[in-house]
Amino acid sequence: MREIALSVGVAPITVSRALKKPSSVSPETRRRILQAIEEVGFIPNQLASSMRGAGRIIGTVVPPLINSGIAEQVQGMSDECRERGYQLLLMQGDFSPEAEDEAIRALLGWRPAGLILQAFVQGPVAREMLRETGVPVVEISEIRGNEPIDMAVGVSNFDAAHAMTAHLAAKGYRCIGFVSTPIHGNDRLRQRRIGYRQAMADLGLSPVPELEVEVDITPQGGAEALRILTARNPRLDVIFCSSDTLAIGAVQECHRLGWKVPGRLAIAGYGDVDLAAQLHPTLTTVRVRRYDMGRRAVRQLLRRLEGDAPTQAIVAVGFEIIERESA
Amino acid sequence: MREIALSVGVAPITVSRALKKPSSVSPETRRRILQAIEEVGFIPNQLASSMRGAGRIIGTVVPPLINSGIAEQVQGMSDECRERGYQLLLMQGDFSPEAEDEAIRALLGWRPAGLILQAFVQGPVAREMLRETGVPVVEISEIRGNEPIDMAVGVSNFDAAHAMTAHLAAKGYRCIGFVSTPIHGNDRLRQRRIGYRQAMADLGLSPVPELEVEVDITPQGGAEALRILTARNPRLDVIFCSSDTLAIGAVQECHRLGWKVPGRLAIAGYGDVDLAAQLHPTLTTVRVRRYDMGRRAVRQLLRRLEGDAPTQAIVAVGFEIIERESA
DNA sequence: GTCGGCCGTGATACCGTTACCATCAACAAT
DNA sequence: ATTGTTGATGGTAACGGTATCACGGCCGAC
């Protein structure tokens, strides 16, 4: 930058202004500066810029990208960040609360303008760190069952699971199984199970542990869940999988067993992945607009950072029950 | 940091040393410094650190995470980065060369220690920028068909597609269709098609345009490809999809049409996603260890950055033909 | 006893940018 | 003619670390 300034014959600060507030530099000077930048191939150092002025990094801790719709969410965040001139700093999490603390600490080291974390942040250590530093935080995915640290964007997984369970009951199913991936420490999954149980209770179908099972988040897990639940409950009507990945595994297992879906057993999923509409039979599931969720989370942060308007703390993105052939 | 130094009664630089080179500070001093850091909840500013010393950011430009195994690759990079104390800065790309240039320029602004880009970087502008700045670059995914800017980690998509085509021919199939997602500007896909064509030629089965089609990278695309190819070529034996997503869509379409797989038509994929082994029938496909690829790309960069050993420029991760029921 | 080297520590400068305040010319208002 | 206002530009300091060199004390070698 000094180099540019010298070659044009102005002070470094003028170069800075030409880039950040073009209106505050005379058109002629600006033109010459931009030309020099072009020629030299100068790329401003964002580190220095962030250290002095406002940082343009948004940090996020995400569960493994491989499964589920997390990739879509990240895509949404990333797209919105790019359009607004921010950078996304990615960390893996969803392990122990300690690992989460560590990931958040690492992100804070970069003095991000804001953080997007999976709802809800578990550890008291992390919550304390975040409160102390005062970084804007959006907790994403879930909006029910806990107080957000700062802001929240997501759906009520409770409502969604409740609605699907009620939908299945309305279709005449009575013995409704529930398959989940490991719930420990994951509020979204917990809310789905609570929603299922509440719906069962509301319908006068007492929720019993025999109807619930936890398996790995793989198609194999779904197949395994199907075997376990049908062995335990011969009268099982339908299984509601808390993730499409599981549901797809279960459908394939039915093919293997030669069972008609939904004739012998109905199956419902959660997430509405691409494949859900292509499966044979097509999959009844819950659609959540995760891509939008990602985008909105970033927007929510930026509104706080750039806007002055009072911001509502919680944004619900809604969900839909997608009724197809499988249930 | 100044604060910590004051409270312990040492110079700031000693605090810095206690964190970066613990051996160069006396045990007693170190203990007191670490304790003070703990108490105050101090988190070192990575921006400042990176500006002066060596940065600990690794930048990457990735295609949309939603499809394919890119998510796995990112997972691999992310895991390796975390273990080595680096941060992953993520940008979306895979659009026009101009967009790629822009993404790379944005990353360079953060003065990353290294970049991981999808092979091979298209634009001459980007190649020039990278050469000028001299950042270590790993081009990931493909290792054939072009000269890497610096280093490359990946498979030969040519060899993999060639091997699968040969495998299909060895199984007795003669009229082998090839389905791809849009190839324009994507070397990996191009190499797969070239590998297919070369194998056809090697086998004495002349490759003809009627046997090839390009569709969107969705299961719907796979279904569409199947309809197009069978309409064009009534004697079609098998279709080789350059992505499992397409293959899965094609299999589902066969179910819809009531066609036996592989009785009426065989189907092969590329990628070996989780679901491939669960599908009905299970999917014959090419396995590429993308997670490993991500990890190795980072390792390759760090070897250059930290190690002094001469590094081989190209790392092949290999592939396997996974023979299952569908072909 | 003197010297050279090592160890723990500190003073200083610097990385590249921008916030803050100062400067100066030109022009309008009084 | 004097003062006030606006617009363009610059000087300086500061963000928070660390590279570099310097310093004093302690030790073993001769």
Image (cartoon, coloured by chain):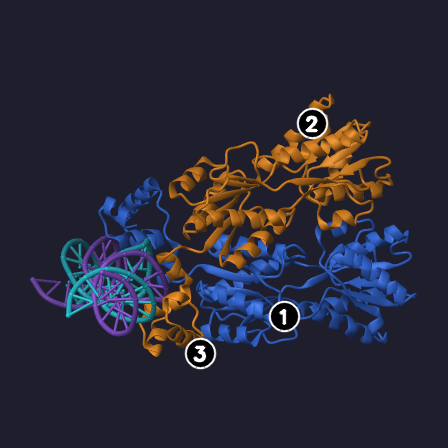
Chain colours: A orange, B blue, C purple, D cyan
Q: Please identify the quarter of the rendering in which residue A283 is found.
A: top right
State the separation of the CA atoms marked 3 and 2: 66 Å
Q: Classify residue B10 as left or right of residue B138.
A: left
Q: Position of residue A73 (x, y in %)?
A: 60, 49
Amino acid at the residue labelled 1: Ile
Label 3 marks which chain's residue? A
Q: Is residue B237 visible?
A: no
To the question of a shared chain for discs 3 and 1, the answer is no
Who is closer to the viewer here, D10 or A199?
D10
The residue that disc 2 covers is A199
Residue shown at the point (57%, 70%) measured from the top left? B98
Who is closer to the viewer here, B171 or A29?
A29
Q: Please identify the quarter of the rendering in which residue A269 is found.
A: top right
Q: Quadrant of the N terminus of chain A?
A: bottom left
Disc 3 crowd, CA 10 A, few/some/many (<14, 14-19, 20+): few
The residue that disc 1 covers is B143
Q: Position of residue A230 (x, y in %)?
A: 79, 31
Q: Position of residue A210 (x, y in %)?
A: 72, 26
The residue that disc 3 covers is A39
Amino acid at the residue labelled 3: Glu
Say which element carries label 3.
Answer: helix
Label 3 or label 2, whichever comes before in sequence order: 3
State the separation of the CA atoms marked 3 and 1: 33 Å
Amino acid at the residue labelled 2: Ala
Asked if residue A284 is positioned above or below residue A166 in the image, the reply reads: below
